[in-house]
Amino acid sequence: MRLWLTPAQADMIGRHALSERAEEVCGVIAGMGEQARQIIPIPNAADDRAHHFQFDERAYVEAMFAIERAGLTLIGIYHSHPNGDPIPSQTDIRQANYPDTSYLIIGLRYGEARLAGWNIRPGEVDPVEIYIGTQAPPPAPVPMSKAEKTAILLATLIAVIFMLLLSLTLLPPAPVIVTPLP
């Protein structure tokens, strides 16, 4: 999984987080495939905005309708950690309801906006590559299938056994040990 942002989009998200540095900010990312086309900030309606985020329901519904009208899909959700790193908290993991959506976290611990992406599914949190550029990113490497991995392991095992057998056949014969008679 990868999330492709333009430099202007990444800057907009970072500026949003820095503009309300004392509180968590949040928003959605609309796009097609892995490419972000629209960043939509959404007001944080959480009771404790310094430590949590919760989308303002009305703004969120309006954003989702706007995304649908534009022919786009929800590809990302972003929020900030005002005093932390861009790593999902236990609350972030518990509240993640979109398993095929990138979760972009902006860490502000060191005074600058640091972005990290995550794919959060029940019991699993995996990093998401964030590509920032105006040109299309290079194709993502295709992960090997289970059959390909099994074939590589089997070929390696056969090669090791073959080398051992070849080594044994190339050994010189054992020397004859003659013991002197007394």
Image (cartoon, rainbow, N blue to C red):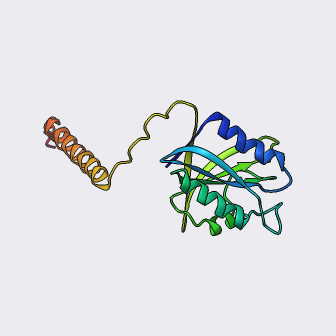
* Residue 146 appears left or right of 11: left
Is residue 129 rendered to the left or right of residue 139?
right
Give above or below for 160 relative to 74: above
Q: Residue at left 71%, top 49%? A: 106
Name the residue at 60% across, 59% down.
64
**Image quarter of residue 88:** bottom right
Residue appearing at x 82%, y 69% in the figure: 47
Image x and y of residue 100, in percent: 50, 58
Q: Give left or right: position of 59 versus 150.
A: right
Q: Nearer the viewer, residue 170 or 145?
A: 145
Residue 63 in the image: state x and y as whole percent.
64, 57
Please name the residue shown 28% across and 47% down the image: 152
Q: How many marks?
A: 0
Q: Quadrant of the C terminus?
A: top left
Note whether residue 108 is visible. Answer: no
- In depth, the one of 19 and 107 nearer the eye is 19
Instruction: From the top left corner, tell me how far across and down residue 166 is, in percent.
Output: 16, 39
Farthest right residue in view? 22
Image height check: is 28 above or below 114?
A: below
Is residue 15 or residue 112 the one in the foreground?
A: 15
